[in-house]
Image: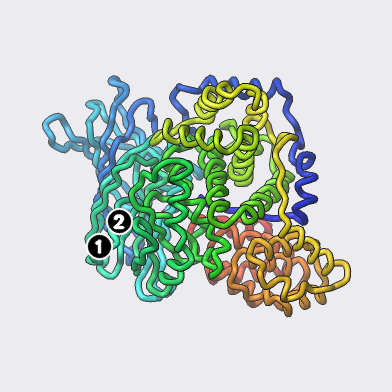
Amino acid sequence: MNRTNKRLLIASAVVATALFTVACKPQPATNADSQTAASADKSQAGQQVVDEHSYSQPNVVRTKHIDLDLAVKPDQKIISGTATLTLEWLKQDATQLLLDTRAIKIEKIEGENVHGAWTPLKFEVAAEDKILGSKLTIETPDRPSKVRIVYSTVPEASGLQWLTKEMTEGKKSPFMFSQSQQIHARSWVPLQDTPSVRFTYNAHVTAPKDLMVLMSADNDPKAARDGDYTFKMEQAIPSYLLAIAAGDLVFQTTGNRSGVWAEPTMVAKAAKEFEDTEKMMQTAERLYGPYRWDRYDILVLPPSFPYGGMENPRLTFATPTVITGDKSLVSLVAHELAHSWSGNLVTFSSPKDAWLNEGFTTYVQSRITEDLYGKEMKDMENLIDRQELATEFKAISPGMQRLAMKPQDLPDPDGSSSSTVYAKGAWFLQFLENRYGRETFDAYLKAYFDHFAFQSISTAQMVDYLKTNLIDKYPGKVTMEEVNEWVYEPGIPKDAPTTDSPRFAGVDKARTDFISNGTVPAADATKTWITQEWTHFLSGMPQKLSPEQMTKLDQAFHFTGTTNGEIARIWYPLAVRSGYTAANAELQKFIERVGRRKLIMPIYSELVKSPEGLALAKQAYEKSKASMHPITAGSVAETIDGAAK
């Protein structure tokens, strides 16, 4: 997934990099501490992973396959039907099957006996936990090979969003889509909702005939829109990659095995923006081996989608906010595509090992970006990531700065430090590449993806493989003490590789000139700037500017009303802090239209700091909450409620 709070920048690339090693180690651990943490983690290697965010017991029984027979009902805002789980019993004295649910209505549960007949099973749904949902306990004294659950979701399901036709781009048909990561699959399918369990699935889905239904499976670009659809996912996936969407969707190709699904008014624009998808696939395959998921299509969702992208296999979900017309934000596609190797193919076994997905993926993304768009683009994005990391490390506890987290450090799986798992994880791999050279490290990483293909692994397993196949194989390059410091200690090691950007240096000079003497950057100097340069320019401004400075910038560059969400998420908070009320009308339109948390939460966070801003925030939220995804609505409500107390 593309991170929620990605790229909250600080003033200067040069200054940030120079100060980084000091700012990022608030409570440095000793080498003995890292050795102890490494030993504790290593003791779990090869053992059954315990995922504290799931009620299920994969060491007792594991789901191997799921058959779904579902009806999508937009008028009721529910999905109803059956989920049939094919089970592998690992303990022959087991008498219960435990599953994860969240606000799902269970009608009945049956088990298939040895004669192929279905018989009722007793079950109990426990009281709901705010984070984990409700444990579903099914009495299975005969350990059936299949269990069938008849159920329906609720309109408030945390993993589904329902939009009326008025809330869509084309305003022709209603729209529904899922968001299962981290643990929201349990809100629309009762299952073992843990990344340590992988399963294949088939699905039969009915819907109103005006809706095209898609899943993270074998979507046929030529499928008729007839309200009756079948799907197969033959590669085993974890639950967080289970996905469904339905709406007024059409297809446009971008390559022999890639394309874009979107509403008719958006599809051509999206296909043009993402026309390099096939080239990205070829680059990744050259570096890390074959693409193993057959097709790679992108579904462009409405602006209410709470994230930048979601790497559902065969069907990445993407926000329309990355479609800027100049391809400056297509690194999101590179990121979600990279998950086809790091995440979807080799998967973290529990949320506390999230960096195995996101850190590896951010590294692979940077390699794809460099290959297609040049080293300068890669360097700018690396600097942005590291600047965000420096900023975030100032605000979070040392425990949240470790790549391998302890269970008690992560009560909510959605609460990990995005900068740690993305940027620090990628920086660690860049450190290894720097020490071993690209040829050696590329070969290692390709072998790693092959070795663990279609498996869910822990940090301990990754470190064991690293030691055997890189550290010991090429002695004298990197020590295990250095590895342990990266993985098990907070902060960033002092010998971390650095980078710089001549283009950012030019942006820094333009900003300095404006702050010191009011000189607005000349149009001929900025006409080639892309999103990364504009956000770097704005993010390095002082916390507040004078009304005259804000007016001068706005008149020159028309930031107020921008269609670029990355610029908006920095400009509007700056406007709020600076008392630049001329931006309020467009600011309010933006946060009412867009639901991507990364873009709107910084704005809400600034608004609630003053009575006037809080009133505006409440007004915008009341007008837009019906079209917000439940995840976004919860974040906004928490921010407003916290300020109002």
In the displayed structure, 576 sits above or below 335; it is below
- Are discs 1 and 2 less than 8 Å apart at CB? yes
Residue in view at x 62 percent, y 59 percent: 601
Q: Position of residue 363 (x, y in %)?
A: 57, 44
Q: Mark 1 highlights which residue? A: 223
Q: Looking at the image, which is closer to me, 61 or 298? A: 298
Q: Is residue 408 left or right of residue 246?
A: right
Q: In which quarter of the image is residue 100?
A: top left
Per the image, label 2 sits on a secondary structure element best described as loop
Q: Looking at the image, which is closer to me, 322 or 228? A: 322
In the displayed structure, 376 sits above or below 451; it is below
Q: In the image, what residue type sits under mark 1?
A: Ala
Q: Residue furthest left?
A: 115
Residue in view at x 75 percent, y 35 percent: 494
On residue 620, the disc is none
On residue 219, the disc is 2
Residue 7 visible here: yes
Q: Alpha-carbon neighbours of circle 2 within 10 Å: few (<14), some, or many (≥20)?
A: some
In the displayed structure, 105 sits above or below 62; it is below
Q: Alpha-carbon neighbours of circle 1 within 10 Å: few (<14), some, or many (≥20)?
A: few
Q: Is residue 387 left or right of residue 193?
A: right
Q: Give me the C-alpha separation between circle 1 and circle 2.
A: 8 Å
Q: In the image, what residue type sits under mark 2?
A: Asn
Q: Where is residue 479 in the image (x, y as percent from the top left)?
A: 65, 24
Q: Where is residue 40 in the image (x, y as percent from the top left)?
A: 58, 21
Residue in view at x 42 percent, y 71 percent: 268
